[in-house]
Amino acid sequence: MLKPPIQELQTYYKTIRTRRMQLILKVQATAFRGIRDYLDNNGFTELLPPIIGPVTDPGIRGAKQVTIDYYGKEYKVMSSAILYKQMAAASLDKIYFFSPNVRLEPLETATTGRHLVEFVQVDIEEANITYEDAMRTAENLVAHIVSYVVDEAAPYLEELGRTLRKFRPPFKKITHREAVELLRSKGEKVSYYTEIPWEQEEKLSRMFDEPFFIIDYPKGARGFYDMEDESRPGILRDFDMLYPEGYGEAISGAEREYRYEKVIARMRESGEDPAKYGWYLDMLREGIPPTAGFGIGVERLTRYLCGLSAVWEARPYPKIAGVYSP
Ligand code: ASP
Ligand code: MG
């Protein structure tokens, strides 16, 4: 595990003028072009992301939401814009946005090398598709980004000393249960009923040399909006994609629960107060088509593309749990 270099992070803003940071930001900008190139050419419409609202994503794995005072009412800063993108896809069919998110992560995440308090994810959602379809979009997108960056950013990668290989989908899929069994066979203590902890996720990611999916998470592990499989109670129709070589989680995604009554039941099960979700439930009551989609964190993507030891190297002004910095 990494030690967070707290002192170094407090003055990390100075790295903006180093050659290394210039190279990283060039590769990152190339990746952004690759993302838009793929999505714009495949029928997606880019929208502006919401930044604040009355509610935000509660499925954030132990992190806390940020509350602001909005003219005497409570608003949240988006921990993810999941609820909004579902509604947008119901109108425009295939949508995406570059969504800035804030999550007050637990202090222990300062050492994972994979967590930022402030980050950006590209949020993608499509109407009338299954989670298998969403995974196809995800693997094609990632394969395209890698290939685009290898072609367009070759001199920067070379100067960074990073050898990046192109991939051809489909990527391997293992179920959450199989992932737990694999880890248990290596002596790791992991549960069938929760998300895989950071450390074990990294170990799992080291066992692969291509990006791969973990699918079918147990219900307790995710937000109320991931759809439960009717033929397999307790199992969700959702997925993560992990980068290989120990880089860990790249993407989370799912088919969404979109039926009013079921959403209310899932909210109650997960301890959410439906009264807080007025606008969202209103839209569901009117009826929306089923959607599926995923989010890909751009700093983790940059970390992988550039071969960085920690995700904070992918931002000139990183915010790490517990570290006070600009
Ligand atoms: N809301 C998920 C997250 O932020 C992404 C998704 O399911 O689309 O991890
Ligand atoms: Mg996730």
Image (spheres, grey):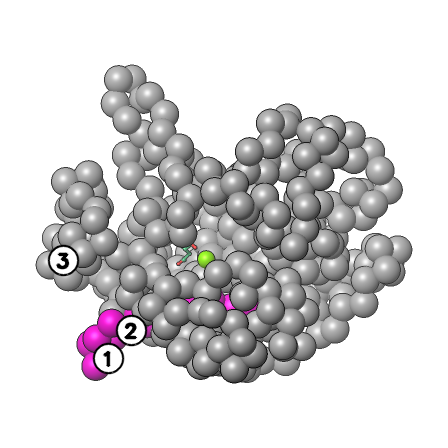
Q: Secondary structure at mark 2?
A: loop
Mark sitting on residue 235 = 2
**Percent x, y of residue 113:** 63, 51
Name the residue: 72% across, 54% down: 309
The span picked out in magenta is 229-243
CA–CA distance in space, label 3 to label 2? 16 Å
Q: Nearer the viewer, residue 2 or 85?
A: 2
Q: Nearer the viewer, residue 26 or 162?
A: 162
Q: Which residue is mark 1?
A: 232
CA–CA distance in space, label 3 to label 1? 17 Å
**Residue 291 appears left or right of 27:** left
Name the residue: 21% across, 81% down: 231
Question: Does the magenta run of residues contain 80?
Answer: no
Mark sitting on residue 265 = 3
Q: Is there CB contact under 8 Å for labels 2 and 1?
A: yes
Q: Secondary structure at mark 1?
A: loop
Question: Principal SS element in the magenta part?
Answer: loop
Q: Amino acid at mark 1?
A: Arg
